[in-house]
Amino acid sequence: MTIQLISRSTGGVAGNGDSGFVNPLIGLPNPALDWQLATDANPFSSDGTKVLFHSKATNLAGGTDANGKHDLFLADLATPV
């Protein structure tokens, strides 16, 4: 098994804000409820190469993200940094 940081910029820099998994069954959850994901739904694509997550980090999308809200991201786990 390989552990991989998914909340990162295209340059490989770690996200500078809270991040967590998105539950596809209920949408964007409260980050404190991420533990529900283990029993509710799977944020990974069927082939395991992509994962859906949310983040308040401002350095993930390129440019400035100053709205203070969680944004959704689809990380490609098959693409190296």
Image (spheres, grey):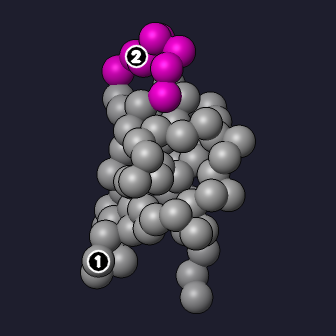
Q: Amino acid at mark 2?
A: Thr
Residue 13 at least partly seen: no
Residue at figure coordinates x 31%, y 70% from the top left: 45
- Mark 1, residues whose alpha carbon is within 10 Å: few (<14), some, or many (≥20)? few
Which disc is residue 64 wearing? 2
- Mark 2, residues whose alpha carbon is within 10 Å: few (<14), some, or many (≥20)? few
**Circle 1 — which element?**
loop
- Magenta stretch? 63-70
Residue at figure coordinates x 47%, y 11% from the top left: 66
Location of residue 15 in the rendering, given as x and y in whole percent from the top left corner: 57, 39
Residue at figure coordinates x 54%, y 29% from the top left: 56
Asked if the residue at tag 1 contacts the one at tag 2, i.e. Cβ–Cβ closer than 8 Å, the answer is no
Q: In the image shown, does 46 or 62 lie closer to the viewer?
A: 46
Q: Is residue 42 magenta?
A: no
Height in image: 40 above or below 14? below
Q: In the image shown, does 39 or 65 lie closer to the viewer?
A: 39
Residue at figure coordinates x 42%, y 18% from the top left: 65
Height in image: 1 above or below 75? below
Which disc is residue 61 wearing? none
Location of residue 44 in the rendering, given as x and y in whole percent from the top left corner: 39, 68
Direction from residue 21 to residue 74 in the image, left or right? left
Query: Viewer-nearest of labels 2 and 1?
Result: 1
Q: Amino acid at mark 1?
A: Ser
Of mark 2 and mark 1, the one earlier in the sequence is 1
Residue 58 at least partly seen: yes
